[in-house]
Image (cartoon, helix red, strand yellow):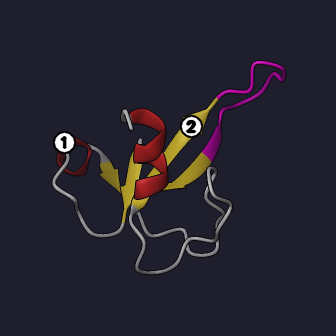
Amino acid sequence: MQWFGESWGAPVCSRGRRVSTPVGSRCEKCALRIREDDRGLIMPVIDLDESGPPQLVVYHLDCFLLQVLPQ
């Protein structure tokens, strides 16, 4: 897992790999484009219906958290 933007103090920010913000990429959850000042994650995803290497998907931090934390 990779992360981008300003650190939010999570373990991924100290142990994960920080990368350049993927400006212009679309968030996997909301489909809005990533802006220079956004924070988020880039994760590999395997499509079980296709053979091939994992695809990297981009999430805004808030979009990712909405998927994994209870409401």
Q: Nearer the viewer, residue 65 or 43?
A: 65
Q: Amino acid at mark 1?
A: Pro
Camera-near label (1 vs 2) is 1
User: Which residue is pictured at 75% across the width and 18% down the height?
Assistant: 48
- The kind of secondary structure element at disc 1 is helix
Mark 1: few, some, or many residues within 10 Å (few <14, many ≥20)?
Answer: few
User: Which residue is pictured at 52% across the width and 53% down the height?
Assistant: 59
| Tally of marks | 2
Q: Mark 1 sits on what residue?
A: 11
* Location of residue 12 with respect to 54 vertically, above or below: below
Is label 1 in contact with label 2 (beta carbons under 8 Å)? no
Q: Earlier in the sequence, mark 1 or mark 2?
A: 1
Mark 2: few, some, or many residues within 10 Å (few <14, many ≥20)?
Answer: few
User: Which residue is pictured at 38% across the width and 54% down the height?
Assistant: 3
Q: Amino acid at mark 2?
A: Pro
Residue 47 location, x and y as percent?
74, 26
Which quarter shows the C terminus? top left
User: Which residue is pictured at 64% across the width and 66% down the height?
Assistant: 25
Q: Mark 2 sits on what residue?
A: 44
Gap between marks 1 and 2, in whole Å?
18 Å
Stretch in magenta: 46-56
- Lateral position of residue 56 relative to residue 67, left or right: right
Quadrant in which residue 31 is drawn:
bottom right
Residue 66 location, x and y as percent?
45, 45
Residue 1 location, x and y as percent?
41, 41
